[in-house]
Every structure is written in C-alpha cells, then in structure tokens.
Amino acid sequence: MAQEHPITRLGGWAGYEVVEDWQERRGGKSWCVLRLEAVTGWLRQCSHCGESTRAVHDQQERRIRELPIFEYRVELVVPRVRVACARCGPRLERLSWLEPYARLTRRLGESVAQLCRVASIRHVASFFGLDWKTVKDLVTSPRKPDSFELEVGRFLWLSRPHCGELARGQVAE
Ligand SMILES: [Zn+2]
C-alpha cells in the first residue's frame, strides 16, 4: 500500500488523496499544484437526493483554487466524480469541501467572504490572486457559504466586545 501523502492528512479533502505535487511559476508567483485522486471504494453521496453509493459513473478533471500554503498559491487538479445514483442516474458527487460547480474550495470561499467585509473586492481578489468577478459573484451570490454570516458574526463579536449590539446590527444588514 502506498504511503499517504502528508498533505492529504492536512488538506482534509474527504474521499480524495494527493498522488502528485509540483511547483510552478506563473506571472511571477509561486504555485503549488496538487493532483488528487478519488479513493477507490469510498462511499459517495448523490448531490441531488443524498443517496449513498460506491458506484462511480464517470469523472472529469477540474482545476480548483485552494487556500495558499506558505508563500505558494495552491491549485488542485481534481477528478470531479459523477456517481451512478440508483434513484437519479448520473449525478455530481456531493462534497463537504466543494460546491457542485464551484471553481474554488469552500474554505477558500469562506476566507474570501470574510475578508470582503473589511476590504474591497478588488483588494481581496488581488490578495488571493482571483478574478475580480469571481470574488464579486461569491459575495453577492445567494449560494455563498452557509457559515459566512456565522463566521463574520463571531469575528465582529470577538473583535468588538464593547459594542456587540452594533456588530450584530452590521451582520444583519
Ligand atoms: Zn440521487
């Protein structure tokens, strides 16, 4: 059995493991690219009905942005699996760490959304090396991460304990 890649443990991409990693230079920036593979025999969920199955219909390679590691911007090469759901037929797999058609992981999306509360969309896009429109869509879309308001609420509450009511009011805007 091949030894587990240490980044697999840290990354927590449930159902997937890192099989290859390399560095690239793009536009003067250092990138770390991680190739993930679907773990064979993993119990997967249909994104439509939630039914569990181990049957994979097919998979297509996708490039997904992830949170940075040290000074590296990170890109995942992920086989996006369609499960063979007994009820619905071929459907995208439901993942805890990636929305169905997202080009960035859930936790990167949450970090982007959090930072957008205190910085402009343009600055946040530049900080993470993302397209301006990607960031704008993320913070204005109704599909923004569920925990966004909760996380921002906690942040404001902890950072401004003397004016908690005001902070709550801002979250509710
Ligand atoms: Zn289904």
Image (spheres, grey):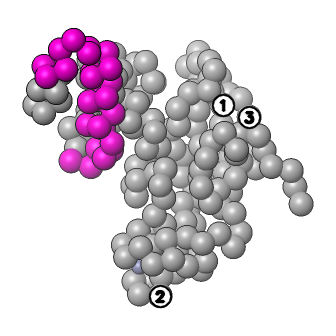
The structure residue drawn at horizontal position 10% and vertical position 31%, both measured from the top left corner, is: 173
The residue carrying mark 1 is 32
Dot 3 or dot 2: first in sequence order is 3
Nearer mark to the viewer, of 1 and 2: 2
Q: Point out the stretch of residues depicted in magenta.
A: 142-166
Q: Secondary structure at mark 3?
A: strand
Give the quadrant of residue 104. top left
x and y, in percent, of residue 105 in the image: 47, 43
Asked whether the beta carbons under mark 1 and mark 3 sit within 8 Å of each other, the answer is: yes
Compare marks 1 and 3 and give the one earlier in the sequence.
3
**Residue 136 within the magenta-colored segment of the rendering:** no
> Looking at the rendered structure, which numbered label has been put on residue 149?
none
Please, is residue 156 above or below residue 51 in the view? above
Q: Earlier in the sequence, mark 1 or mark 2?
A: 1
Residue, disc 3: 22
Return the residue at label 2: 86
Q: Is residue 107 above or below residue 54?
A: above
Residue sitting farthest toward the right:
1
Q: Residues within 10 Å of mark 2 (few under 14, many from 20)?
A: few
Q: Nearer the viewer, residue 166 or 122?
A: 166
Residue at disc 2, CB closer than 8 Å to ligand 1: yes
Q: Is residue 57 visible in this depiction of the protein? A: no
Q: Position of residue 12 (x, y in %)?
A: 61, 47
Image label count: 3
- Binning the other alpha carbons within 10 Å of mark 3 as few (below 14), some (14 to 19) or many (20 upward) gives few
Name which residue lies at 37% across and 76% down.
Answer: 49
